[in-house]
Amino acid sequence: MTNSTHQSANTGFFDLHITGLGYLNRIREVRPKRGDAFWACDIAALNGPADDVGYTRFDCRISGREAEVLVKRCRQAVYQGRKVLVGFKLGDLWTDTFVYSRGDKAGQTGVSLKARLLFISWIKVNGEMVYQAPRRDEQGAGNDRSAASAESPKTGKGYAAAQVVDAVGAFDSSTMH
């Protein structure tokens, strides 16, 4: 019995998070035949040198409650053709293969990078900052640390998950209307 207690005390997991910045696209509600509906989006993440930027596309299921509220607030701006740039944190990266049904690649196999969108640290619409998550040190010592805010507060780069109340009123600018 001591052995099983010791094993369960040592059982854990390792997170693999992807942080970056990218453009929001294809914000949508997904209603699978089985299971509950959920919100999803694509993020075209910037990578490479600033003078020759490349993009990596992530198909994301929105998992963070605050991230869902924020992405829904961006939906109209995205569909109006505005450039919505976000700082993000993704988790649980996996690949999915599919077969192209149309176009030049019809019949060929493709690969999609999929992940869970956990956290949005900031949002710019057409270059104007419309949302910035409060820093962890501004949240107070009583809040729980979540997987979305696991950086050390000493680095000055860690952010706490945005409060839903703050997120709802965060886009009261002409940029979002």
Image (cartoon, helix red, strand yellow):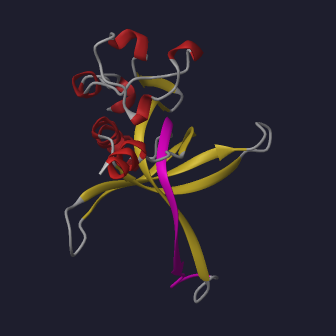
Q: Report the residue at 37% width, 42% height from top.
A: 9
Q: Which residues are magenta?
A: 86-103
For the residue pair 34 and 46, the one nearer the viewer reads as 34
Question: Is residue 83 shown in magenta?
Answer: no
Could you tell me what secondary structure mostly forms the magenta stretch?
A: strand
Compared with 131, 177 (above or below) is below
The image position of residue 169, as x and y in percent, is 25, 23
Picture coordinates of residue 113, whole percent (x, y) = 54, 62
Please name whichever residue, 134 or 123, is drawn nearer the observer in this view of the structure.
Answer: 134
Q: Residue furthest front?
A: 1
- Asked if the magenta segment contains residue 87, the reply would be yes
Q: Count the labels in the image.
A: 0
The percent position of residue 30, horizontal first and vertical second, equals 28, 63
Instruction: Say which quadrant the C terminus sits in.
Output: top left
Above or below, comparing residue 50 to residue 160 in the picture: below
Q: Examine the rendering and report whether any part of residue 173 can be seen.
A: yes
Compared to residue 57, the image places residue 66 above or below, namely above
Judged left or right of residue 114, residue 35 is: left
Taking the view exactly as shown, the residue that stands out farthest to the bottom is: 107
Horizontal side of residue 168 vs 160, given as left or right: left
Left or right: residue 31 versus residue 118 is left
Q: Would residue 85 be seen by someone viewing this image from the given angle?
A: no
Q: Nearer the viewer, residue 69 or 151?
A: 151
Q: Quadrant of residue 109?
A: bottom right
| Residue 176 image point, x, y percent | 35, 32
